[in-house]
Structure formats: C-alpha cells, structure tokens
Image: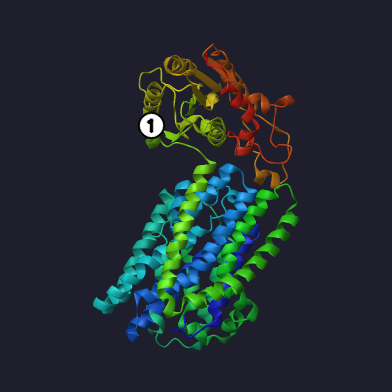
Amino acid sequence: MASLQYRPAIDGLRAFAVLSVFIFHLNHSWLPGGFVGVDVFFVISGYLITSIILKDCESGSFSLANFYQRRIARIFPAFFTVALATLAGAAIVYSPQDLASAGANLAFTSLSLANVKFMLQGDYFQISSDAQPFLHYWSLSVEEQFYLVFPLFFISAFKYVRRHLVAILSVLGICSLIACIFLTQSNPVWAFYLLPTRAWELCAGSLLAVVGARSMPGCGVGRASWLQIAGILMIGLSMLLVHEGPLFPGWRAIFPVIGTLAVLSPLAAANQTVERWLSIPLLVLIGRMSYSLYLWHWPVFSLIDYRFYLASDGTRLMLKIALSLLVAACSYYFIENPARNFLNQRRIRVGAFASIIATLAICIPLGVSIRRSNYVNAELADVAKGGIVFKGKAGASSVVLMGDSNGSMYGKVMKEICADLGYKLTVISVAAGDPLPSSTGNQSQLWLDSLAIIQKEKPDYLVLACRWESKLKDDNSRLADAVRALEPSAGKIVILNQPPVLPESATRECVRNGMRPPFIEEHSTGTLRAAANQLVLNLKSPKTSVADIAGHFELPDGEARFLDQSGRQLYHDSSHLSGYGAELIRPVIQAELVLNLN
C-alpha cells in the first residue's frame, strides 16, 4: 500500500468492522448483525487492492510477481502462525473426532478452500462453533480466491478495453448480486460461502476505486459530509437490525456494502468531522491490528468455550477478551509487521514464494495426517476398492470393521487395538451408510460391496456396529439376514450393541447456557433402542457374540453417562460416542478380539 496516500480513517473503518465481528462472536444478542463487519472488509479489500493495481497500471509499473509477493507478505505469516497455533491448541483441548475435523480444516484452509469445506459441512450460523476453530477462515479464502483471479482479469481489461472498465466491473458486480439474491432463496449456505455470490461486494470496492470522484461532479463538501454520515449510519443500523440466518446475505447485504462505499468515497476526506472520528489513534491502532485480531479471536473463543464449558459466562468472557487482545497484539508487533517488512523486499522475492510453498508442503500433509489418525471412516469409494487397510504382522489374525457412523466412531480405537495385537484391520464402515441387506430385494451397493469384501477376505473377526434403533425400526429382520449371509465367511462376528441416545439438551452450548447433567434419554427413543438391542442379543450364537457397549453408558433412572472421571465428554453428539467414550470400552472390544476362534 506504499503506492497510495494513507488515509487513517480507513483503518478506523477496519476497527469498526473487526470490533463488530468480535462483539457478535462474544454474544450474538449484543450486536445481532455484527457479522456484517465481514462485508465491510470485503468492500475495503476490493477498494484497496484495485487502487493499488490501478495506480501501478497507470504508471506502467505493475508486476504480477510484485503483487503476489506483497500478498504473501501481508497475509501468510500471521495466517499460518495462527493456523498452526490453533491446531496445537486443538490437540490439547479437543476430543479425537474434533481434532480430526481441525486437521481436515487446516488442509482446506491452507489451500484457500475453507469456504468450500464449510459450505459442504453446514450452516455458518448452526455449526457447533466451539469445535470449528478455523471457521472464520472462510472469508479469507474468499478474498484469496479473489486475489488469485482478479489481477489477471483487471490488467487484461485495463490493457485492451480500458474505456469499458467501469461497465465491465458494473456488469460483473450486478450479475454476482443477482446470483447472490436468488441463491440465498434456494440455498443460503452456498450463497453465504461462495466467491461468485460474494464477488459483488469486492467488485463494489473495485468500482469505487476506478470511478473515484469522477462519478459525482460538483458534489461539494456539505454533500460529501452527509454522504459519509449516511454511510456510517447505514453500517451501524445493519449491525443492529440485520439478523443471522438463511435470509442472509441476499439483498440485505446491500446496506452495509453501500454504507462502506459512502465512507470510503474519496469525497469523504472532505468531511473533517467523520474523517477525524475514524482517525482517532485508538481506532487506527485497532484497525492496523484488525487482521491479527480477526485471525486470533475466533480460535481463542472456540477453544475457551470447548475447554471451559462448565465455567461461568463471566469467566469465559474475561478469558476471551484478555487472551484475544494479548495474542493479537503480540502477533501484530512480532509476527505480522516484521514478516511483512522482511518478505516485501525485492531481493528475497524468490525466498518469499519458496516460503509459502514450503509452508503448504508442511500444513497440508499435517492436516491430512491428523484427520486420518483421529477419525477412521471409509467412503463408499473406499469400500468399492476393498476398504481402508491397516496391515498387521505376517500370520496374525485379521479384522474387518463394518457399519455406519456408529461403526466408524470405534475406528480409531479399533486401529489402536489391532496395532497392539499385530492384527490386520480393514475398515468398511461408512458414515451415513446403510451396510445391511434389504428384504425387498433392492440391495444397496454398500451392502453388496461389504459382503464381497467379507467373502474375499474371510476375516478372523468381523466387528459390526450400527445405530440399530434406526436401522431395524422398519424391518427388524435385516440384521439377522446379514448375519446369515456373513457367518460362512467370517471366523467370528462381534456385534456391538447401541449405547443410549442423549437428549438435545446434552451439548456444550446448552451446558454453557445453564443445563447440567443428569441427561435422560427420551422415553420413546430409549424404548426403540432397547428393543433393537434385544434383537441384537437374540442373534448370539457360537459364531456370533454380542458385546455390551450400552451397559457402560446406562446409569440408573434412565440417565446416560455424559462425563468420565476427568470431566471429559463421553459423547461426540447425541448418538455418537466421543474418542474418550470409545476409549472407555476398549477393554470390551479387545476381549472379543483375543477369544479362541476354535
């Protein structure tokens, strides 16, 4: 940004935006629309990036290598410092499944695809936020994707169709806005996360940079004053009146965008009152630190909420504010600024690009490795190819883990047990899969592929686990049919019965809001589960054993065992055990795998 005249008020506007996001994440009710601070950032980014490129193009000094070097220096030192620190915190605080999710998110974040990952994962406003410390990286991924394609587009348009640059940017922005409005109605999650439906906000800033004051000839100081005041009011009202949910972004995002354009307008500098207010030294300092504060605050909030969910609101609030400000300040002064100054030097351009390649080469495999180590689940394509195989010692027994997500929740502990025993393990459990036959004759591909693997592998042990309450609800003969088909090819079948299902109130968020154990399984669900577990037990035979998992989580009076002796959650969600819960019944599973097969 050295090529532009510095306006402290822009940093003041950044402070306004980041503090709104910060407050919204502290408590949504305090500033219901505080998340529109991200939209303000998008407009500012589009404006500043285009201003830089335009000025360099007009002087004939634009260089893609220089542009991307500056982006690397500006974005990535703090970006990856926070990412790796977040992963380290997750390794200390999170259960294995949530650590696995953090590892996967690190890989996608490193590739600037966090927005795509979270788009496919769920709604920003409904995701279990304390287990998603990389969630805020979605907006950075949108900007990084924009930075990747926009300079090439802009310099081509500047070179060949400069006279039509305003028209081209306007058409692109309008098309993106229309797509955003219509997609918000049919698929708001996609509209929220995707660059094509967010590009209009960045394009709005770009258009302002190109048009400048020329679009408003004769607009005097008085009119400029009202323009900027109106812009501040529009942003502020958006933060108060816009609410989270499926109606956003859509047309509601227009208001903070227009407000930001009004404040950024070159004419705004004529308004000394608002310009001075936005240039207050404290606001300017926060604005300069806004990137570090944005990066750090969310993982700090998430990890504190996850680890201290039993603590009081006041305790967690003080920890969040104090720790976020501390690490953000340290990051700004000791990482972001020094690294940016160092990496911006032309003499180390090659080193700057090499550093980002090296960092990606570390972070992506690290994230993938952590994902695979802490959550073992096959996809349908894996099963079609023979499953996920962990080799054992020569001549040792072989084990196959089969089931749905209730099978995969034992994947990690099964892998560790088999590694200790030297057994070969093949995982064919698929989350959201249906691995049982159908009495109608229309068989799922997962069942057919699973049966083929068992018939080919002829494992010594076949461990079978599903959410029996739902799998057997409409056809209680399915499991018996599966056992009859599988028994001839397996040395021993071990069926794990189903543990209790927690009520909806048994979450960390509900506990933070005042709920406390005991958590009682709903009567209707408990009745169905007990009936399903009895069906499972009825299949016990010399070749089929039933391991009692449920008994380790059923307490008197219908209470489900929620915490272990160390205060760790034994459930990942209402119907799945956490890694700690699975670890609790390791001896039960291991005992079944060392029984004499004869």
Dividing the picture into quarters, in which one does residue 52 lie?
bottom left
Q: Is residue 301 above or below residue 346?
A: above
Q: Residue furthest top?
A: 542
Give coordinates of residue 394: x percent, y percent.
46, 29
Name the one closer to the observer, 460 or 169.
Answer: 460
- Residue at image point 40% right, 60% down: 195
Q: Is residue 214 above or below residue 324?
A: below
Residue type at numbered disc 1:
Gly
Give coordinates of residue 256: x percent, y percent.
50, 67
Q: Quick one: label 1, few (<14), some, or many (20+) residues within 10 Å?
A: some
Q: Which residue is mark 1?
A: 386
- Residue at image point 54% right, 50% down: 102
Give coordinates of residue 194: x percent, y percent.
41, 56
- SS at mark 1? loop
Q: Is residue 504 above or below residue 355?
A: above
* Residue 425 visible somewhere in the drawing: yes
From the viewer's perspective, tell me whether residue 382 is left or right of residue 305: left
From the viewer's perspective, tell me whether residue 468 is left or right of residue 173: right
Name the one closer to the observer, 328 or 207.
Answer: 328
